[in-house]
Image: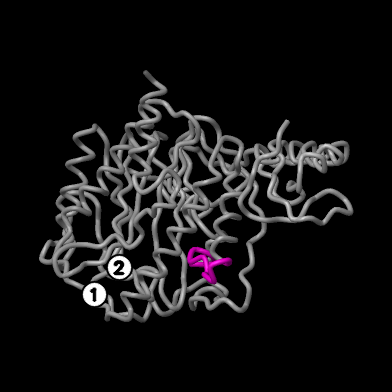
Amino acid sequence: CCLHNMAEERVCASLECGKPAKMQCPTCIKLAIHDGSFFCAQDCFKKSWATHKAIHKKAKQDAQVAGPLTFRGFDFTGQHRPWRQSPKRKVPESIPRPDYADHPMGTPLSENTARANQIRVLSPEEIEKMRVVCKLGREVLDEAGKIIRPGVTCDEIDRVVHEASVERNCYPSPLNYKNFPKSCCTSVNEVICHGIPDAYPLKEGDIVNVDVSVYHNGYHGDLNETFLVGKVDKKSLDLVRATYECLDKAIKACKPGVRYRDLGNIITAEASKNGLSVVRTYCGHGINNLFHTVPNIPHYAKNKAPNTMKPGHVFTIEPMINAGVWQDEHWPDGWTAVTQDGKRSAQFEHTLLMTEDGVEILTARLPTSPAGSAWFQTVDKENENQTE
């Protein structure tokens, strides 16, 4: 087998070599093995094969031991199950962190004391900080997107998100927020949101949402995307495409004077047109130096959300769209929200800035993003070509 070329530089795993290594063992990639998987060249890889392959055997054994778990007396709504979680990852002390990061209960004290009904209009200086942190968040999510393929575990996605955040001098906002144990959320198939990354290995045909938030220079940026794992069935592809369109049409409607409640009508109309439903339990939110704040932005029709959009408002829109009923249930872990009927769910999210004449997508894709600035359209076209 041949080594896989990696852009990130590591040290060769061959004994007594120590040279820079940019090539990774392809079997290690499939098994989501990171440590000890990099080599400087094919020759070093071949020389080390007799001892290196033991890592593969151990990983397979560990996966069998880990396996899917269960909650005693709990009836799952779908096929997805929790797996073993790795220990909480650490953030260097040198990186500034939000107030909840070191709180024993993960309590966001600043959010609890903020004025509940007043939407902040950010100053030019604050807006520039939001632009910076949102671009960093985009880079982090793009790093996660690069590794998604069958066999990669949700825990490996979390590791990549954590390390990419730290490399950019960012604190991963979900970590210890109300005691959430990981650095991002990975929501697979029927999981609507807040899936806890664990040892589950992604399978061909899965869909997985990766929700990334980072804290930098006192401000948060928040975004997510639903990724296709290998080739997915048409129903899943249609669900993800329609969810993308729900967010896109809501964003295009944003301008000063628009009522926040009206976004729910737009999203519901697009979802209903495709025979899909809109989750009502979770909503978009204001974001700035606080991870979650006003305004609350429901995604369903005929909601009663107050307030209108004004220049300087920064907020997220993040519709969760279900293939079946809109109702959700929760696993006993206190976080994982799943569809009540076990059918699949998808989500996309951007952080947005209201300007004088429209809206700026602060977490927009970059030319360097996987598949470029129009990621979903590209993936959509590729999958349609495969099914013809």
Q: How far across and down, in percent of the image, does residue 150 sit?
A: 57, 35
Q: Are marks 1 and 2 in contact (CB under 8 Å)?
A: yes
| Residue 119 marker | 1
Mark 2 = which residue?
A: 286
Measured in 3D between alpha carbons, the distance from the residue under mark 1 to the one under mark 2, in whole angstroms, is 8 Å
> Closest to the observer: 195 or 315?
315
Q: Amino acid at mark 2?
A: Gly
Q: Amino acid at mark 1?
A: Ile
Q: Quadrant of the C terminus?
A: top left
> Which mark is first along the chain, 2 or 1?
1
Report the coloring of the rendering. one colour
> Closest to the observer: 382 or 148?
382
User: Residue at 52% across / 76% down in the picture?
Assistant: 97
Q: Residues within 10 Å of mark 1 (few under 14, many from 20)?
A: many
Q: How far across and down, in percent of the image, does residue 154 sit?
A: 57, 46
User: Residue at 26% across / 42% down in the picture?
Assistant: 245
| Horizontal arrangement in the rendering, residue 191 relative to residue 359 (left or right) | right
> Closest to the observer: 306 or 73?
306
Q: Is residue 171 magenta?
A: yes
Q: Which residues are magenta?
A: 166-177
Vertical placement of residue 195 versus 178, above or below = above
Vertical placement of residue 174 versus 95, above or below = above
Q: How far across and down, in percent of the image, does residue 360 sit?
A: 25, 62
Q: Residues within 10 Å of mark 2 (few under 14, many from 20)?
A: many
